[in-house]
Amino acid sequence: MKSKETRIVQIISHIFCGLIALCALLPFVLMIISSVTDEAWATSNGYSFFPGKFSLEAYRYIGVQWDTIGKVYIMTMLVTAIGTTVSVIITTLFAYGISQKNVPGMKFISFMLIFTMLFNGGLVSTYYTYIKYLDIMDTIWALIVPSLLMNAFNVILVRNYITFSIPGALKEAATIDGASEFRIFASIIIPLSLPIVATIGLMTALSYWNDWQNGMYYLSGREGTHLYTIQIYLNNINENIQVLMQNASKASSIGAKVSELPSTTIRMAIAAIGILPILIMYPFFQRYFVKGITLGGVKE
């Protein structure tokens, strides 16, 4: 039987966690409601959880403009799929390597990994390296390679999981049976590391799906427009509208262009469609996500 004090603490904790969850959920609810709000009403009254008039015009616009929006949607999925797959492969291989205590040089490599978490070359030198030596400007690799391909924090999570959650006796037995390192990695380490692999996979996919800065840095002019993702497309819309609105009073033709650009409710509808795959995927990865973070993060 739980004591009265324990029940009170649990009730307070549940109320507190519920309020935090509500604060995280409300922006999504507002976004969905705004996407089905009448444009004229939203322009006059702003965003509201209880709009005076509903409309599906924003989604009709998306249907009409699907040739453009559909392409950026497909590009987003392609970049996320390629980037996440390559990132997970590199991260797990790196983590497995530095988890081997009997391999010379692994301590130095681990130190360099931690060092990169604390210090880096800065934006200017990084930008110059990518465009001068890797030549990724206006290519799909501009959305995959910079800053997202491998994360040091994810490597540490996987290393800790392998070190503390997978018995070393399994590897020793496989080695005695003649299994190679690659066979051990593919047949033992990866299947037993599914929770942490799913965790870093989900976090990496979210990073790729929500990224827009790399497009701003490495996609220039018309040459890079065919590589726009959902987030880059939305950011581009916002910037264009802000610039045109600032100059709308100078020329009537500019004011006309403002009216042709996607406005409040349409931007919300595009954002709602943009997060839909993530919302669908998350429930399937939730149990792996919680278990992976717990086992990979708290043991050291």
Image (cartoon, rainbow, N blue to C red):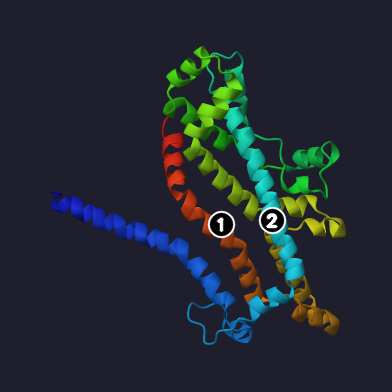
* Residue in the foreground of this view, choosing between 27 and 56: 56
Q: What kind of residue is marked 1?
A: Ile
Question: What percent of the width, then of the height, locates residue 250?
Answer: 83, 80
* Residue in the foreground of this view, choosing between 39 and 249: 39
* Residue in the foreground of this view, choosing between 264 and 254: 264
Residue ID for mark 2:
76
Q: Secondary structure at mark 1?
A: helix
CA–CA distance in space, label 2 to label 1: 12 Å
* Figure quadrant of the C terminus: top left
Residue ID for mark 1:
278
Question: What percent of the width, then of the height, locates residue 221?
Answer: 85, 58
Q: What kind of residue is marked 2?
A: Thr
* Residue in the foreground of this view, choosing between 181 and 255: 181
- Asked which quadrant contains residue 246, the reply is bottom right
Residue 53 can be seen, yes or no: yes
- Asked which quadrant contains residue 179, the reply is top right
Q: In this rendering, would 258 be left or right of 277?
A: right
Q: How many marks?
A: 2
Q: In this rendering, would 176 be left or right of 76?
A: left
Q: Which mark is residue 117?
A: none
Residue at x 14%, y 50% (from the top left corner): 3
Residue 118 can be seen, yes or no: no
- For disc 2, the neighbor class at 10 Å (few under 14, some 14 to 19, many from 20) is many
Residue at x 63%, y 54% (from the top left corner): 209
Question: What percent of the width, then of the height, locates residue 52?
Answer: 52, 87
Please identify the residue farthest to the front as the structure is shown. 177
Considering only order in the chain, which callout, 1 or 2, is on the residue closer to the N terminus?
A: 2
